[in-house]
Amino acid sequence: MEDIVIIGNGISGVTAARHIRKICNQFPNIPNKTITIISSETDYFFSRTALMYVYMGHMTFEQTQPYEKWFWEKNNIGLKKGRVTHIETDRKTLILDDGSEMPFDKLIIATGSKPNRFGWPGQDLKGVMGLYHKQDLDNLESYAPNNRVCKRAVVVGGGLIGIELAEMLNSRHIPVTFLVREDSFWNAVLPDGESAMINRHIRNHHIDLRLGSNLKEIKADENGKVRSVIIAETGEEIACDVVGLTAGVSPNIDFIRSSAIETNRGVKVNRFLETNIQDIYAIGDCAEQHEAIGNRKPVEAVWYTGRMMGETVAQTICGNRMAYDPGHWFNSAKFFDIEYQTYGWVFAKPGTHEKHFHWKHSDDTKCITVSYNSLTREFLGINTFGIRMRHEVFNRWLNEKRDVDYVMTHLSEANFDSEFFARYELEILSAFNNQLQSV
């Protein structure tokens, strides 16, 4: 019997546990394993991406839990509530915050991310929170249940979590000031035309968007609660009751740094998700590849890659050593009511021999940007806003190295919108051909 311990009950850790058990059940020749998941956050796995919908009233927290409570016992997966404070690699033992110890034969570190905090004065006041943990949702309900208790909220940080939090507060009619340090929203990721459209969309939802603005300080009232924020560039003081700190995330590995496990920004792993210590692995947001895979970042805080890492490490632990291969990049999000998808690579600023074609609908809520090689015309990637596309179609075209002319001509094959939605392929193709003729 082999003891597998997983630290973290997010998508990566739970996927690893599920697939280890599934493989063991399918192949009786594999030695049986005990599986224990340790987490200090919640008793059961839940979908972090659904937290916003709980606050907005679209679902209950219980509905974010994809597995019934009986699932864990039925699949012989142990759940332990606790926080690991140290890993003794030589003894293969975990030390928990209550002083207890837990031995392991193989260990999977899947501790995810934590919100970035940059030492702002007042960042630990009551009413300051992120949007990552179940506790953040509880804090929102306490400090921003409605616009009578919370007269204004300030959100700091212009990424996907920031705009989600702004939308959540806006859904309860709480005025929001949104501080974004860049001169256009998410312009390190989005090309100029897309970023500018999202700027306008945010403001159209009555969000007080402050571009090129940094937080200097959070001020407290006499009860140690948020009273206001100070903007660094102007010294302006904005009265508020809640401050959301959403300036990105970083791997949650502080307790590991004192161990023999190699770390940098995250826990260093090879392509097999193995650390420098035998029988210890790291997956998900907390793992950092020794060498980046293609154009991907060494650390990726993305839901689907965390799931893929869980599936991959399960194979290795069950005797089928497998390299992690995330395939072509893709992602999706929502900016209020505009859905966003990206497939392949569309960089904010085109690189050498990279060209962008950009189309925007007259209603200013739909656009696409197509990236291609200007010499070979190979299709490199696409961003879509307000138009649903099929992942499997673009994945196939990227595998086949289709040229951009083929993609634009066959764009309707990738459309995922239902039959009652308007279609824009002919308008997009016409604009693309007009751009070619004008070059």
Image (cartoon, rainbow, N blue to C red):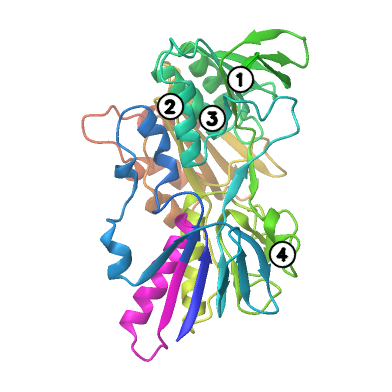
Q: Which mark is residue 358?
A: 3
Q: Which residue is mark 4?
A: 290
Identify residue type, mark 1: Lys
- What residue do we see at 50% from left, 35% from top? 136
Look at the image and give the residue range highlighted in magenta.
9-36
Identify residue type, mark 3: His
Q: Which mark is residue 141?
A: 2
- Residue 89 point in image, percent of width and height: 68, 75
Give the alpha-carbon distance from disc 1 to disc 2, as whole Å.
Answer: 15 Å
Q: Which residue is mark 1?
A: 225
Q: Earlier in the sequence, mark 1 or mark 4?
A: 1
Q: Earlier in the sequence, mark 2 or mark 3?
A: 2
Q: Is residue 26 left or right of residue 126?
A: left
In which quadrant of the rendered image does the N terminus lie?
bottom left
- What residue do we see at 62% from left, 74% from top? 93
Are there few (<14), some (14-19), or many (20+) residues within 10 Å of tag 2? Answer: few
Asked whether the viewer can see residue 399, the reply is no
Identify residue type, mark 2: Glu
Instruction: Tell which of 400 and 138 is nearer to you.
Output: 138
Q: Earlier in the sequence, mark 3 or mark 4?
A: 4
- Residue 436 point in image, percent of width and height: 55, 32
